[in-house]
Amino acid sequence: MSLVKRISLPKISDPRGNLTFIEGQRHIPFEIRRVYYLYDVPAESERGGHAHRNLTQLLIAVSGSFDVLLDDGKSRETVTLNKPYEGLLIDCFVWREMKNFSSGSVCMVLASRVYEADDYIRDYQDFMRTVRKE
């Protein structure tokens, strides 16, 4: 799926613990305009269930693991995130659903834009009609 890409992030190993950092326009192809994270998600819960018109995001499992179902209107795939030094870059017009959160998992999201309610496509049928027009 060309609208999604795994990104390896810098990992500095040290006997005292590891460190990973992310710089906008260097490690990811956008300036970071918003950061948020999901945590204490019950194992049976799902998050996401939307696409964006103009937003690019990097998802990182900073702790634990979860699955990301991705759909660009032509193909679907599921990616498991479980490494804090690896991110999943998701471009606009990709439907995403996150599920199977492990106990104690934390999903950090770096976004290319601030929150804009109108940027979300929250209905899957609307998403499919939109991507067919593209």
Image (tube, rainbow, N blue to C red):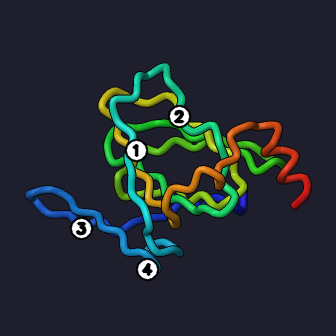
**Amino acid type for the residue under numbered disc 3:** Ile
Please identify the quadrant where the N terminus is shown: bottom right
Q: CA distance from mark 3 to mark 2?
A: 31 Å
**Amino acid type for the residue under numbered disc 4:** Arg
Q: Are marks 3 and 1 in contact (CB under 8 Å)?
A: no
Circle nearer the N terminus (4, 1): 4
Task: Label 1: state its secondary structure.
Answer: strand
Task: Label 4: state its secondary structure.
Answer: loop
Q: Position of residue 44 (x, y in %)?
A: 49, 19
Residue position marked by numbered label 2 in the rendering: 47
Q: CA distance from mark 3 to mark 1?
A: 20 Å
Q: Residue at x 39, y 66 (%)?
A: 9
Q: Position of residue 19 (x, y in %)?
A: 22, 62
Task: Choose between 70 and 125: the one closer to the eye.
Answer: 125
- Which quarter of the figure has residue 6? bottom right
- Which quarter of the figure has residue 13? bottom left
Task: Label 2: state its secondary structure.
Answer: strand
**Amino acid type for the residue under numbered disc 2:** Arg
Q: Position of residue 51 (x, y in %)?
A: 67, 48
Q: In the image as oriented, which residue stretches furthest toward the bottom?
A: 26
Q: Are marks 1 and 2 in contact (CB under 8 Å)?
A: yes
The disc placed on residue 107 is 1
Q: Residue at x 35, y 52 (%)?
A: 84
3 or 2: mark nearer the eye: 2
Decide: is 75 above or below 8: above
Give the side of residue 89 with respect to residue 31, left or right. Answer: right
Residue position marked by numbered label 3 in the rendering: 12
Give the side of residue 132 with respect to residue 95, left or right. Answer: right
